[in-house]
Amino acid sequence: MTIREIAKRYNELAKENRYDLIQNELYSEDCESIEPMHSTLLRSIKGKSAIKLKGLEFSKMIKEVHSSYSGSPSIAGQFFSLEMGMDITLIDGTRLELDEICVFQVRDEKIISEQFFY
């Protein structure tokens, strides 16, 4: 797959909230997930299995998803980015509106890193 095909597929699946398929299809086994230093909910990790676990742990914190979005990808060299966000209520009742820029690096037809800016 080209980077354009990977970015398009990621965006299609993100709009359906199918992050399980995104990870299974598009991520390398040694992918890295990088969160901002100020993040209180999530931490940076390495490895596809750790990223899958991180996603499951995050979904367990969510009581309700009110809305979510994924913008069109921008591509430059071996990177693509997406504007993404969601309006959620956590299990503890806290309502959050999350908006972020997500940057992905692709090598050998797989995503090797994801980095979030929020």
Image: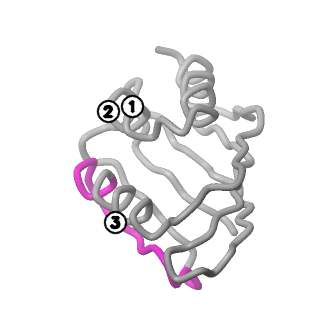
Residue type (three-letter) at the residue carrying disc 1:
Leu
Point out residue 103 in the picture as x, y percentages from the top left corner: 61, 49
Say which element carries label 1. Answer: helix
Residue type (three-letter) at the residue carrying disc 3:
Ile
Looking at the image, residue 88 lies above or below residue 109: below
Point out residue 57 in the picture as x, y percentages from the top left corner: 35, 65
Image label count: 3
Point out residue 78 in the picture as x, y percentages from the top left corner: 57, 34
Residue at mark 3: 45
Task: Specify the label residue 65 is tagged with.
Answer: none
The residue segment tinted magenta is 37-51
Residue count near mark 3 (Cα–Cα under 10 Å), binned few <14, some 14–19, many ≥20: some
Residue type (three-letter) at the residue carrying disc 2:
Asn
Say which element carries label 2. Answer: helix
Residue 97 or residue 109, whichever sits in front: 97
Residue contact between numbered discs 2 and 3, judged by CB atoms under 8 Å: no
Q: Quadrant of residue 79?
A: top right
- 98 inside magenta stretch: no
Residue contact between numbered discs 2 and 1, judged by CB atoms under 8 Å: yes
Residue 16 or residue 93, whichever sits in front: 93
Residue 24 or residue 108, whichever sits in front: 24
On the picture, is 91 further left or further right than 82? Answer: left
Q: CA distance from mark 2 to mark 3?
A: 17 Å
